[in-house]
Image (cartoon, rainbow, N blue to C red):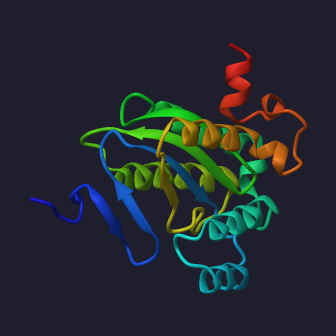
Amino acid sequence: MPDQLHPAPGWHSRGYLPHLDVPGLIQSITIHLADSLPRQALEKILSSTAPDDPERRRRIERLLDAGHGACWLARPEIATIIESALLHWDAKRYRILCWVIMPNHVHTLVQTQKDHPLPQVLHGLKSFTANVANQQLGRTGHLWARDYFDRYIRDDGHLAAVTAYIENNPVKAGLVTRAEDWAFGSARRRSNG
């Protein structure tokens, strides 16, 4: 029987964004720091675009890539915490296909697993990394934004496009000229064999 901690798979929402949670589904996930999206700019995007409008996601991605907020993830010691946590649960709670840690957000492409609902996995990841990062930074308070963005992968073409987008995000944001030059992402690991 479904309950608050173990919801039935499928579409759900905590009152913010709609999410899909189905074991075995490949999904693109974006989590971002609590201060990474200026409130007024985000509210304008949300009020002027429909939830299923592809332009909504593009505009939010441009805001994230602009580097708003404290950008704690630009600090190598904080990015290392996030990367270690992401990789620790690979093949245990999900299968990670690719990832990149940007200065104020993280993109991952994961395949979910049975008995590990995506909301529970992300809550654990965000809670653990927030505690460790806040301790390292000597701060308290929310590190991550409350919600996350997820999008299920429709087919092989979509998978290839999302993989390229994630791994090339540092290039698109003007942080490096080649994806494999970005220290905290799967493109670098892939190029190093």
Q: Position of residue 159 (x, y in %)?
A: 55, 38
The location of residue 9, given as percent across then percent down, is 25, 55
**Residue 42 percent location from the top left of the image:** 67, 78
Residue 158 sits above or below residue 54 on the image: above
In this orientation, which residue lies closer to the viewer: 155 or 100? 155
Q: Which residue is drawn at 61% across and 56% down?
A: 134
Q: Is residue 97 left or right of residue 72?
A: left
The residue sitting at the left extreme is 1
| Quarter holding residue 78 | top right
Q: Position of residue 180 (x, y in %)?
A: 79, 28
- Whether residue 93 is visible here, answered yes or no, is yes
In this view, the residue farthest toward the top is 193
Judge left or right: residue 137 versus residue 113.
right
Quadrant the C terminus occupies: top right
Q: How many labels does the image show?
A: 0
Would residue 81 be visible to someone looking at this image? no
Q: Quadrant of residue 60?
A: bottom right
Depth check: give the residue in front, 181 or 155: 155
Figure quadrant of residue 176: top right
Quick check: 94 above or below 127?
above
Q: In this view, does 54 lie above or below 188?
A: below
Q: In which quarter of the image is the N terminus?
A: bottom left
Task: Write the residue at 69% across / 38% down.
Answer: 164
* Residue visible at 46% across and 46% down in the picture: 154
Residue at image position (79%, 67%) is: 68
